[in-house]
Amino acid sequence: MTYTLDELKKIVSDGLDEVHNNISNKEKVVKYYKYLYKSQGCKCKIPNVDINNMFNKLKDDGIKKLEEIENRKFHLRDNVIPIRVKGVNIDNVNLTDELAMKLLKENENRISLFKIKPENWQEVVAEFFYRTPKRKMKRRKPRKKNTTAKKDTSIKNDENNEKKND
């Protein structure tokens, strides 16, 4: 199944009553929810409450999330096993352009994992990393000089030595 923004907008605009009345729309709500949130659904025991919660979540931020996915420059192939990077599985839902460019900077052969990419992807990646400011190292503040001067014990020692010599 392909997940499109137009279809999700139509389901949401039709409303919750239409979802409850149409089994096809109910199945689509479940599929979109599983796709966007990597979940089996809500943990409610009443199926209609599950559908209500899923529908409301899709209505509240599912459309925005799907818009972000569709507007990216990079999309993984459909048959690609999620890539594990630093303990996180990367797939089309949580992939960002920045993350895709980092993957490609580390290994250019990973370009074969993407079905949608800019034609000039090498330039895009190079420009991104050239343009991205590097974190500045924090300069350590110089240590404050000790304002309490040490007592000059050499003068006292000289006075003590003179008294002993007398």
Image (cartoon, rainbow, N blue to C red):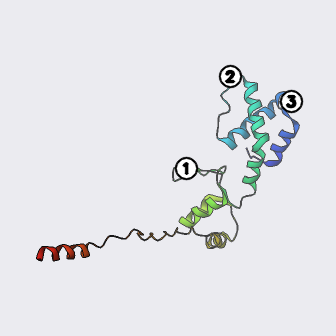
Q: Please, what is the three-letter code of the amino acid marked with disc 3?
A: Asp
The quadrant of the picture occupied by the C terminus is bottom left
Q: In which quarter of the image is residue 57?
A: top right
Q: Where in the figure is residue 111, as x and y percent of width and height?
A: 61, 63
Q: Distance between the residues labelled 2 and 3?
A: 20 Å
Which residue occupies the foreground of this view, 132 or 101? 132
Q: Residue at x 78, y 46 (%)?
A: 63
Among numbered discs 2 and 3, the one appearing first in the sequence: 3
The residue beneath circle 2 is: 45
Q: Where in the figure is residue 139, as x and y percent of width and height?
A: 51, 70
Q: Is residue 108 above or below residue 81?
A: below
Q: Please, what is the three-letter code of the amino acid marked with disc 1?
A: Val
Q: Is mark 2 on a helix, strand or loop?
A: loop
The residue beneath circle 3 is: 17
144 sits to left or right of 112 = left
Residue 107 at least partly seen: no
Q: Residue at x 26, y 72 (%)?
A: 153
The residue beneath circle 1 is: 88
Outermost residue to the front: 166
